[in-house]
Image: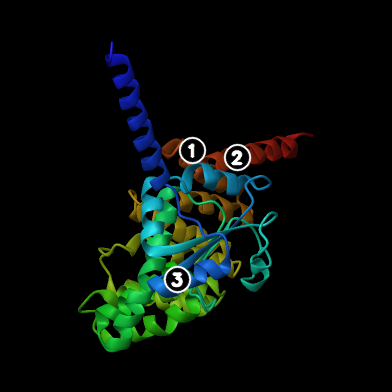
Amino acid sequence: MHKYPIFLSALSVLLFLSASIHAAETVAWKTSWDEAAKAAKKSSKNILLLFTNPERCPPCRMMEESTWPDAAVVKFVNANFVPLKIHTDQSKERDLGNEFRVMGIPTTVVTNPDKDTVARTAGFAPPNDFLDFLEAAAAIKKLEKAVKAAPEKLDAVFDLAKAYTDLDRKTDAAPLLEKVCALDKDNAAKKKLVALYLLGTIAFQNNDIEEAKKKFLEVSKLDPDNKSEYADDNALQLAILPANERNFAAAAARLRKFANTFPKSEYRPEALFILGRCHLMAEDAAAAAKALEELIKDYPDSRPAEYAKRILADIKRNGNETEQP
């Protein structure tokens, strides 16, 4: 007669423990800037500031449903940051968005209590990608201290430069990457090659095509046998460069060489797609169709193949219209 009450009591305990565990697996959001800043100063952590509005913003809602509840994300955020959520409609402190120059949501800003931005990212990110961002942002303070303590230590300078690059802090990354090139002058530690490649990407993003070409060519000289992890990426960058100068025929020739030289590269579908586009820009529809058909055949389930099918349909339709008397 006593088993039923005992069972209910045990069930209640289990439900309580389950609820407690579930509660522990949520981000410990603060509700005001003052509260977050006070906690950040006390714990020597940075503030993770989220601007969101899941009721109106589909990417915000996707983050709420898949990224923020992720166990690894929750654990890392609570351990390394003081999280503060600002709802752009409901929060009394939504004007913080102007202070941090928020242009869209969701936006996540890592900042210190003095409101100096350490890192930021905008838009939807799945858990693994968002965790990469969080890890890089959390490491910055430690890496900066390491460089301050040993400014001529190659590994310390390289790690900080790489972290700045990963966080899109190009202005901070560039001088450190140049320093890596000086410290690893002969590429003995294989870090000069990486630094040159990253400098090339920064120049390319800044639309400094000549400087980008110079850096990418230096990478090629250091890796003539294409054995580095950046070999295919670097070769693709060099292949694309002529297209930025509207020399589409030259770009097409280099992209074809890339596709043949790196048959197993993860960038090959993208290269074939750009190859097709370059042929189109060079007014060679037949060559464009051939490249796009190759892409669809070799990588039928890829995103570039989806785009290729649409362009190929346009090519064929325009060809039929041209052939009509």
Q: Which mark is residue 269?
A: none
Is any atom of residue 182 visible in this view?
A: no
Label 3 sits on a secondary structure element that is: helix
Q: Residue at x 41, y 51 (%)?
A: 74
In the orientation shown, which residue stands out farthest toward the top? 1
- Which three-letter amino acid code belongs to the residue tagged 3? Ala
Q: Is 161 drawn above or below residue 65 in the view shown?
A: below
In the orientation shown, which residue stands out farthest toward the front? 1
Would you name the residue on which mark 3 appears? 40
Q: Residue 82: image x %, image y %? A: 45, 64
Q: Residue 202: image x %, image y %? A: 48, 74
In the rendered image, the quadrant that contains the N terminus is top left
Relative to 207, 4 lies left or right: left
- Distance in Å between CA atoms under marks 3 and 2: 55 Å
- Sequence-earlier tag: 3 or 1: 3
Please identify the quarter of the rendering in which residue 319 is found. top right
Q: Residue 40: image x %, image y %? A: 45, 71
Relative to 134, 308 lies left or right: right
**Picture colour scheme:** rainbow
Q: Pointer 2: residues within 10 angstroms few (<14), some, or many (20+)?
A: many
Mark 2 touches mark 1? (CB < 8 Å): yes
- Sequence-earlier tag: 3 or 2: 3
Label 2 sits on a secondary structure element that is: helix
- Which three-letter amino acid code belongs to the residue tagged 2? Leu
